[in-house]
Amino acid sequence: MTRELQGRKVAILATDGVERVELEQPRGALFAAGARTDLISVHPGEIQARQFDMVSCGTFPVDRVISDAEPDDYDALLLPGGTVNPDQLRMNPDAVAFVKSFCASGKPVAAICHGPWTLVEADVVRGRRMTCWPSIRTDLRNAGAEVVDEEVCIDGQFTTSRSPADLPAFCAAIVEQFDKAAHPAPA
């Protein structure tokens, strides 16, 4: 087990409808690399996870509510997908403001599958090269991003992937990119 992210703290922003594997596998990779994570959501308690968007597959406990979270408390941000999850996040002003502020900090941000929808809503994709699930490529293009069909796309602070099939490459890439964060956030 490597520990390159020892002392780093990662915000995972998700809500009901998150694609379970897109939260669970990256979180596991981050944990294995020594990072601490907080699952931040729009409501307290637990969020409902899904498999293939349709099948209920358990819950995740929420560590912090978005209205109480500050980007300065974190070294990196992870936006898992699932169709319902980012659709709800982009409708929540606190979630959008958090993402916009986090992106403005220059710290690393990773999004997979439908996760970039929240980045679109935060108006931070213009001029960026990104990948995503095929059905939201038009949304990214219309928001000013250059969309590519690649397993993992890294452009500055952003790391994006297309789907759960890309998770092995995505997990390796986010550990590497999050390791490049300047300094760990205060404990």
Image (cartoon, rainbow, N blue to C red):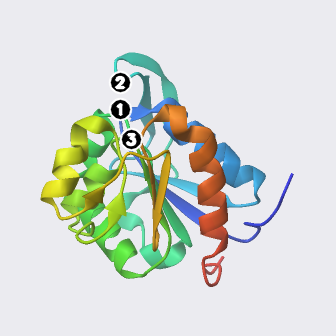
Q: Is residue 92 visible?
A: no
- Element at badge 3? loop
Say whether disc 3 or disc 1 marks the residue closer to the N-terminus: 1
Report which quarter residue 4 is drawn in: bottom right
Say whether disc 2 or disc 1 marks the residue closer to the N-terminus: 1
Q: Amino acid at mark 2?
A: Asp
Q: Residue 29, relative to residue 134: is it above or below?
A: below
For mark 3, does the 10 Å Cα neighbourhood hold few (<14), some (14 to 19), or many (20 or more) residues?
Answer: many
- Which residue in the structure is indicated by mark 2? 53
- Which residue in the structure is indicated by mark 3? 113
For mark 1, does the 10 Å Cα neighbourhood hold few (<14), some (14 to 19), or many (20 or more) residues?
Answer: many
Q: Residue shown at 18%/65% (left/top)?
A: 144
- Which residue in the structure is indicated by mark 1? 17
Q: Position of residue 28 (x, y in %)?
A: 68, 44
Q: Residue shown at 29%/71% (left/top)?
A: 100
Q: Amino acid at mark 1?
A: Gly
Q: Residue shown at 35%/47% (left/top)?
A: 43
For mark 2, does the 10 Å Cα neighbourhood hold few (<14), some (14 to 19), or many (20 or more) residues?
Answer: some
Q: CB of mark 2 within 8 Å of CB of mark 1?
A: yes
